[in-house]
Amino acid sequence: MKRRKMLAAVGLAMAVALPLAACGSGGDEAESGPVELTVAVWSLASTPEFQTLFDAFHQANPDITIKPVDILAADYPTKVTTMLAGGDTTDVITMKTLADYVRFAGRGQLKDVSSLATSADAGKLAGLDQYKQDGDKYYALPYRQDFWVLYYNKKMFDAAGQPYPTNLTWDQYVELAKKLTSGTGEKKVYGAYQHTWRSIVQAISAAQTGGDQLSGDYKFLADQYRTALALQEAGATLDFGTAVTQKTGYASMFESGKTAMLPMGTWYIAKILSEKKKGSTDADWAIAPLPQRTGASGITTFGAPTAFAVNKKAKHAAAAEKFVQFAASAAGAKAIAGIGVVPAYSSDEIRQQYFALPGMPTDDLSKKAFTPDKINPEMPVSDKTAKVDTILNEEHQLIMTKQKSIDDAIKEMETRVKNEVN
Amino acid sequence: MADLLTATPATASAAPPPRARDRRRARRNTLIGWSFILPNFLGFAVLTLVPVLAAFALSFMEWDSYNPPEWVGLDNFERLLNDESTKIALRNTAYYALGHVPLTMLAALGLALLLNRKIAGVGFFRAAAFFPYITSMVAVAIVWNMLFNPEFGPVNQFLQFLGVDSPPGWTTSTTWAMPAVILTSVWRDMGYYMVLFLAGLQAIPVEQYEAAKVDGASTWQRFRAVTLPGLRPVTFLVLVLLTVQSFKVFDLIVVMTDGGPGRATLVLSQQIYRRGIVEGEFGYASAISFVLFLLVLVFTLVQFWINNRRERR
Amino acid sequence: MTTADTAAAPRARGPLALARRAVLYAVLALAALAILVPFLWMVSASLKRNNDVFTIPIQWIPQDFQWGNFTEIWTRVPLDTYLGNTVFLSLVITFLQVLTGSFAAYGFAKVRFRGRDTLFMLYIATIAVPWQAYMIPQYIMMQKAELTDTFLSLILIQAFGAFGVFLMRQYYLTIPDELCEAARVDGLSEYGIWARIMLPLSKPALASLALLTFVNTWNDYMGPFIYLTSNDLWTIQLGLRSFVGQYDADYAMMMTGSVLSVLPIMIIFLLGQRHFIQGIASSGMKG
């Protein structure tokens, strides 16, 4: 008995001592001379926007060189969580998702950058609101804001003799998709490809009906699920089960001409531009606004920002703040817009520059798609986001694989959110 | 923790403790024993045992991985009892282990017996059997999901050929996803355990087989009387490793179904990962691992005990 | 179907035995083919363009072979650095694991002392704790020791695992105690018994431990991912995953890399498996 107590005490002491001992050095505000700034990013090689930003920043601040900390995209949050727990002193941390941001900010691992967020330029930052914490504090500034549009393959529309998708409702979208579907077996082409993420149903209906994904009331999802299932039953999209289990890539579906329409985020523009340039696809593409609910006025879509934050234990906090501010400024926006990435900083000048990119479709419909009337958040942010996300995702799979009816699954979402999320 | 262990039949080992009549010899043996164990134990204790103990301590605390932990007593365990996802994960894990352990064991032993002979090209066949273990997990998941595809997958086409009217939906069905995962994992792991069995078969002296043959024992009798007893320590090793591996299964499930559809293949390791890393509740995640640990410990102790009783007989 | 058949086989040489052998080969070949299907998919994917990897239904033979993938990968990522790092880590970890594991196993299997079995249970028990549970405390310790982002951190964590001890102990149990007793009478010290008697007798077990440790280290992803940050320390598994981006992945390149990374393991396996030939251990034991 005595020994057990002792062991417990030792274990306890260790557990308590661990985080305390992990305290690193704080940031030194008054710095001069050359600085090497470390920035945690994901998949540096396949995400050219980071290097582009670093180069532009270094040009503007020649005494600061940037050393990227390259982390694999798939497990980025795992590694950053572990690093920060250990008291890592990497200066700038990229916030891959809002849910991650809330967690890191909530633990006090990020430096308060509210002063930057209230400056004049910051008013032009799309998605900034979503980083507001505890009333009026900001711990990160967005540099990128992606939102959803409808990609389409002009050649396939022309071949089927269908007009390009202007002002579609979801019902029209389904009908159009049916008409654009043809062939069987290896030759089969689909009218639309709905990727497997839950956002494609849930975030769209939340954005367009005004429903709240954290509310615990999910009846607003029903219409959009009926649309998604109708599309699937008509064989006008690749069936969900197959898409999930075969890890179907939306990019290869679209670029190899397997689908005529693809609702997807604007991040895909940069990718398809570079694929066209390399000559690995001949898809004749353009974008249109996302389909809307019947009777809706204006274009409502959803989007998600990406941001940079300063580590509270940063070695070079002042330089880090400079970088975060630069990335969110007009200069930073110009740099990343140059490679097809949609910056959070929005102005007419940037938009013009964006549509002047070689290979970018310049028709009016594409331009209209690029200026939606309203971009709602993909998912509201709170400390419950991660949990609700898991539940909604699990029930989404059950509906889409037809293991549960829409109504049953919605009821289940409501009970589970009530029971499992405090 | 040490009390927990000594209170079990673990002390009744194959080797009876030395009699007190020669205390000096006992002390000398202890010194010698520890001198063998120490090089490994030092690394093990500092780098594995200490963090593991810290994790156990954390299961009684609330911790966000950064700020000082807060003592909450048994709160995490109480929560565990009411957390439906954890209960489902526990059930799924047990289901998986019940399928995976015996099937892999049989497949691995069968392969080892089949390939423990001097025939031309045996190296190639052994390598083939081992290949699933080193094939990229993504490739494994893709191909098996394709084989199990409800519409055009070969598995269901074969079942339809046999006259099954409505073959299962496999990984897209809540009922059949787990069997599909189990079959895939047996296929993947059997070569790994075959290697252990192959090495074990080498330790059985040929003389024993020859003696049995002279006595007129049939193939099956020789298997029962010579092979099985000779393999007992290895069988115990494989059984424990397999049990542990089954209860900790993570990678294959993440790549193949990611716990879905719904929560049909959600397992404990995933739940620990989600509650800990994803949702930031490390105390609660530690409590789940504690339960997982206890489960495996009970299984292992029972096996240890049965094994020792057999050995003494 | 037992090993005894092996001994009998060379003697029986009739038409019946030949037929049996033919059937055996047919069964083995068929089974091998079935087992290798996912590997064949991997090879096929490594020779495709990325957009052609996931076609439905599966296309087994690429439309036009992208042999260029196998040269392109070396310029896309520093694969030679990754390979070198992986070889180094795998060799060092395997060597230490086999050495300390077999040494400790002798203490657990052949020396009798108080508390031995309790200690042994402690070893096995820790294998049961999932790494996700203690990953962060372990990392914090390493960070405190300023060992993160070094090979040493990974070597220390993986070289002293319980796996090798457990495996070797079980094999030592199959070796009769009388052999040790005889050696003791001859005046050999315990260390001498380990080095001169146990090690040579446990060659198949050592081979299997080395093989499995090597493969596990080679294929480990989470360990290197958490502990190795600098790109010039990365292992091959990290290199492969670097083809996965935020929204998409280059699976063709991943499979090309996977095929390349399997080749060294195959060679190691073919070399190692030769120790599993019936008779080595038993002839040693006659002496």
Image: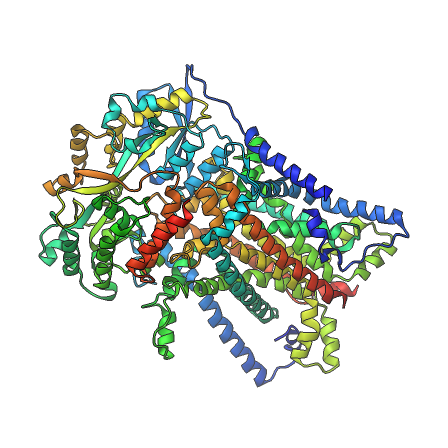
Image coordinates for residue A133, horizontal then vertical, percent? 35, 30
- The answer to whether residue B183 is left or right of residue A248 is right
Classify B180 as above or below A148: below
The residue at the point 49 percent across, 75 percent down is C26
Q: Is residue B104 visible?
A: yes
Placement of B285 over or under A16, stated as above or below: below
Q: Position of residue C246 (x, y in %)?
A: 34, 43
Quarter in which the C terminus of chain B is drawn: bottom right
Q: Horizontal placement of B28 versus B110: left or right?
A: right
Q: State the residue in front, C200 or B14.
A: B14
Judge by depth and name the residue closer to the eye, C236 or A208: A208
Residue A410's place in the image compared with A309, above or below, is below
Q: Is residue A393 visible?
A: no
The chosen color scheme is rainbow
Q: How many marks?
A: 0
**Horizontal and vertical percent position of residue A418:** 38, 48
Give coordinates of residue A33: x percent, y percent.
Answer: 41, 15
**Residue drawn at the location 70% of the way across and 72% of the way down:** B226
Q: Residue furthest bottom?
A: C15
Relative horizontal placement of residue A171, taking residue A38 as reference (left or right): left
Which residue occupies the extreme right position in the image? Answer: B21
Q: Name the foreground residue: A68 vs C23.
A: A68
Q: Residue at x 56, y 51 (%)?
A: B291
Q: Nearer the viewer, residue B123 or A221?
A: A221
- In which quadrant of the rendered view does residue A111 lie? top left
Q: Is residue B182 above or below residue A288?
A: below
